[in-house]
Amino acid sequence: MSETQPLGAIHRSFLSWRRFHYARLAAAASALALTVYCLDRPDGPPNGGTLLGYFLGTAGLGLIIWLAWFGIRRRRYGASGGLQGLLSAHVYFGIALILVATLHTGFQLHANIHGLAFVLMLAVVASGIFGAYAFWRYPALMTANRAGATLSGMAAQLAALDASCAELALEFPDDVAALVQAAIAPRAAQGGKPAMPGREPTLAAISGVQAELSGLLGTPPATILALVQALTARLALLDRLARDRRYRALLLLWRAVHVPLTLGLLVALGIHVFSVFFYW
Amino acid sequence: MAVRFHFAPRAGAAIDPRRDLLLEGEAIAIGRTPRSDLRLSDAAIRYEHAVLVAGADGLRLRMLGAAPGTPEILLDAPGAFALIGPFRLTRGAAEPGADAVVVVTPEPAAPGGEAGAAWYQRAFDVSLPNVRLMALILCCVIALLGFAVPLALAPHVATGGAVARLAASSWNVGVMSRAHRFFGDNCAACHGAAFSRVSQNACLHCHTGIGQHADPVLAPAADLRGQRCETCHREHKGEVLATRAAQADCAACHVNIHATAPGSTLRPAGDFAFLHPDFAPSLVIDAAVRKVAPVAAGVADPPDASGLRFTHAHHLGLPQLRKPGDAACAQCHVPDASAASFKPVTYAAACASCHAMAFEPRHPEWHLPHGNAAEIQSRIAGYYARAILAGEAFPPPVPGLFARPGAAPPADPPQGQALADALTEAAMASSIRRSDCGECHVVTKSAPGAGPAAWHVAPVYVPERFLPRAKFSHASHATTPCATCHAARTSDGGPVALLPPIGTCRQCHAGEQAEGARVATSCVTCHGFHQPAHPLMTPISVETK
């Protein structure tokens, strides 16, 4: 590890763990599988039922079970010792699984339980690749976006700005005050989760307040400017919070796809193996 | 009108005298604007909210901007109150120095509501869908549609409808061959007990009469009984049934066939280019019973007992048959419907145009039928009898070939029927035996007399194939001139001389691993595996299930 480690490198290191140790291992395994596949001369077209097909299928099944086991292993307390290496292996052997499984199929895909298992496998790996990308990319973006603040800090900042805006808005005529109120008033939580505030009401409030400057009403210009400033700061904070939420969502939601699809894949895979040997 | 306003921090609390306010005027403006007489700073108070006026019956609160017809609120006696935003304006007891007293108290705040920061934190939370529920639903749907339904409907595919067939097809591991697709939905047609491989009987149930590959006694290793057909014939692998046909599989036994099958008469064979015996054509050894036998090795021009006198060299040298290239051959050899082979050469189609069966020089229009000695004899007798009855004079036939010079003429020349009989016998003896029938056939007189039973035409059998153990398609070789393989223009020998030696084939064909300019040729390119017609082969018996 060099001393000039860039920001966010901690999040990337699982990919380059021990100088891409598992990337090289997975590439070697893939190359071996591909070479054997190219050299193999089965009776009839290549498929899962040839000797090599059974071998690749067994290897793929083993890989899938081992990859899925990572979901259990990573939850285990005290697993931190080898977890980063394990994650590295999980990523690269997950990618290698695409090749192993595709060679197992002999490039045949049909609308049946076997094809479903293959498609589910592709979807699981694709979601996993996105997850790896997310963990490589978003933590750094998130840190930059928060600019040293915490989520609760930003929320408190927003609430304080709301209070200032409310205070300042009292000096304004009803229509303008209503706009400011609409922008800052938290929507009442009807038992459920509050809705994420949009930026449009704040934008409308800013233009409403700015219009006051050219009006002939009695609000002092300093108050108007103060309110515009507060509302603009609020808007910027809203944007940062929305971005932060998007990053957090991307870091979380891929797993909401990855995990159920993995379990679905295990079921489909079980049926695939069962059906093949049930009608041997 | 002078109105004194008292302010209390909350309902029921003591009045804060420092905030007391005495306002005078006909109308007292209440609102949020700094220009209001009574300024109430709260978001719920409008800029100009209401006006308090004095009426005949007391104070009246008139809401500004309210819908027309909204009644004014009367504050006529102590205790009367009006709600304005989050404030309560209550008429108080009379006090000196003021016409009226109004107490302003904030209404208690509505319960609930979150602090802003916590609210925002929750608003920007990421709400995950219920991952466990999603996983559970997905797993259940897959298990139900992919496992339970196909398993439950499996016994009903043969009688069931489209749903049962669709469910069965969801477990199909690959494209079924065209030959078996018509019952392909019914897994149980081939797959017997669960988790056991498809047995030989499942195939033999329909495919009766499949031959052994070799005599099981002679070559026990090649005994196919109890073997799984799927060892070589793989279903679910595509539109054409994938069949194992590697040269190495054949060579495993045939390279050293005498070790595998000690009693075998076969010669060692492996790669077509390097290890394959010379061709041993099967020649006729008894045309009467159509019996053929392979030529023994080393015999250059073995006798052919086809019963036919014929040479290609003679015929192709005749002026009327002399044509360039394959056109000469095509005069007699016409491809059959498959174009893989030729129609049998018949007298009518190939010979009759030149070999008209006329026997009487005086009557070239007298023709005889081909192939029936009894009818020939009767036709000749008929021709002569009719001509004699019509008064035509025929010299009586001379016994022997020529009349001896100076010999006395027959004392009593035959007349009438006797003359016809004598002429018929003479025609049968000379023309039929030697010049006409005898030109192509072996005709002998095996009994005395003139009847048809006296004459014997040796049976003719020209087999369609001289290498019956091999497949060969002339259609596949249509681009090759006949003369490349068949030396017909120079051949005056039997079939062996006409057939190409293996070296001719090897000019274009090499073994399975051939590369470059020669055609890769596996064993099964020419040879079949199952041999139901071979004398040594016996069909595999179908064991009862």
Image: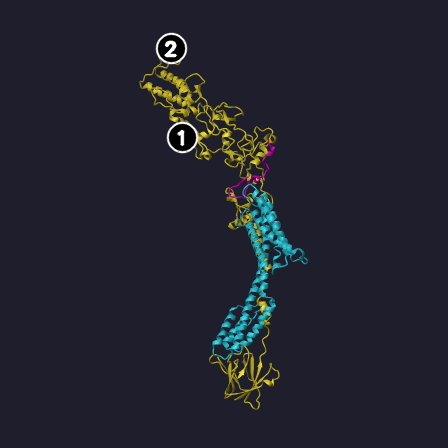
Which class describes the residues within 10 Å of circle 1: few (<14), some (14-19), or many (20+)?
few
How many discs mark residues in the rendered view? 2
Q: Are marks 2 and 1 in contact (CB under 8 Å)?
A: no
Q: Is residue B384 left or right of residue B175?
A: left
Q: Amino acid at mark 2?
A: Arg
Give the colour in which the image draws chain B: yellow
Quarter-wise, where is residue A143 in the image? bottom right
Q: Amino acid at mark 1?
A: Ala
Marker disc for residue B404: 2
Closer to the N terminus: mark 2 or mark 1? Answer: 1
Of the 4 image quadrants, the one containing the C terminus of chain A is top right
The residue segment tinted magenta is B218-243
Residues at marks 2 and 1, CA–CA distance in whole angstroms: 49 Å
**Residue A79 visible in this rendered orientation of the protein:** no
Give the colour in which the image draws chain A: cyan
Q: Secondary structure at mark 1?
A: helix
Figure check: A9 above or below B315: below
Q: Is residue B67 left or right of residue B128?
A: left
Q: Chain of mark 2?
A: B
Q: Nearer the viewer, residue B241 or B375?
A: B241
**Residue bearing the label numbered 1:** B327
Farthest residue in the bottom direction?
B96
User: Which SS does the magenta portion mostly show?
Assistant: loop
Figure check: B404 above or below B159: above
**Residue B83 image point, x, y percent:** 54, 80
**Residue B196 image point, x, y percent:** 60, 43
Farthest residue in the right direction?
A78
Q: Nearer the viewer, residue B247 or B112?
A: B247
Which class describes the residues within 10 Å of circle 2: few (<14), some (14-19), or many (20+)?
few
**Residue B86 visible in this rendered orientation of the protein:** yes
